[in-house]
Amino acid sequence: MGSLMPIGSFARASRISVKALRFYDAQGLLVPAHVDDSSGYRYYLADQLRSAEAIRALRMVDMSIEQIRDVLDAEDPHAVRGALDEHRSRLQGRLADQERMLRFLDKLINYKEIAMPYEVETKQVPSVRVVSHTVHTELRGVGEAIGQGFGAAHAAAVAAGHAIVGPPFVVYHQLLDESTPGDLEMCVPVPPGAEGPVEGPLGTVAWKDLPAAEVATTVHAGPYIEIGPAYEALERWIQEHGREVVGPPAEIYLNDPSEVADGEQLTEVRFPLAWT
């Protein structure tokens, strides 16, 4: 074993705080070369500075702890390159979303006209059988959670030999903001009575019937990141017509974002109403 560096020295050399080093130790990312049995003090090898710098750089580009662990554990350089390329694509997609949001904010702040008016109507939606996957997430993790949830639900339906009989949708069981996480339920419609495995490689799923309901609904045409005014239009209509919302909202994805041009996405938003 080479010369050991106490945690304070290693922190200064790596530009990572002692608190963060302890966290990375607990996560198994950067384990000290030696821990004193009596004092619990951590010591590191100078050779570990390269790993520390990699962790610091990856955190600066917003890579998750789990993803960093996969990169550091990978022995194949091609696997490392693939993980970095995948993360680069995520960042580029996030940047495009942020640029769209800035354009949208410019319209709001300068009182420019929002792209489309929203026509609100009520309708009866029948009971539907779904396979679903629920994820507890923060606001910043919504996109990843939706992808994970639809992947798990779709894989379960395919594994059980069932057709997908309608557009996928998300039920927002709680309101999410920057400080409040909540549950999202990603649902894939399947034939009546469909059953299948509840455990799979992509996560646990549920097979269930969602009840029929009367809903107030409108359609948002455009990027999902600009969907806020659709919610506002629905809430205004509900208040004006003296109706009561009795359950969580749902977003139904009427076309596949990967198959249409940017700005041509169609998303139906539904609020369940009390029976009158």
Image: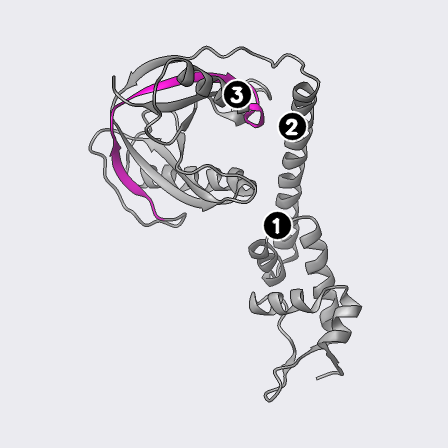
Q: Amino acid at mark 1?
A: Ala
Q: Which residues are magenta?
A: 204-227
Q: Give the image quarter of residue 159.
A: top left
The residue located at (79%, 69%) in the rendering is 12
Write down the residue under mark 1.
83
Q: Nearer the viewer, mark 1 or mark 2?
A: 2
Write down the residue under mark 2.
101
Q: How is the image coloured?
A: one colour
Write down the residue under mark 3.
265
Q: Helix or strand or loop: what does disc 3 sit on?
A: loop
Name the N-terminal-most of marks 3 and 1. Answer: 1
Residue 89 drawn above or below residue 22: above
Q: Helix or strand or loop: what does disc 2 sit on?
A: helix
Q: Give the image quarter of residue 36.
A: bottom right
Circles 3 and 1, Cβ within 8 Å, touching? The answer is no
Q: Helix or strand or loop: what does disc 1 sit on?
A: helix
Q: Residue furthest right?
A: 13
Q: Amino acid at mark 2?
A: Met
Q: Give the image quarter of residue 155.
A: top left
Q: Amino acid at mark 3?
A: Gln
* Residue 90 in magenta stretch: no
Q: Residues within 10 Å of mark 2 (few under 14, many from 20)?
A: some
The residue located at (67%, 54%) in the rendering is 59
The residue located at (64%, 75%) in the rendering is 32
* Residue 225 in magenta stretch: yes
Q: 202 or 65, which is in the foreground?
A: 65
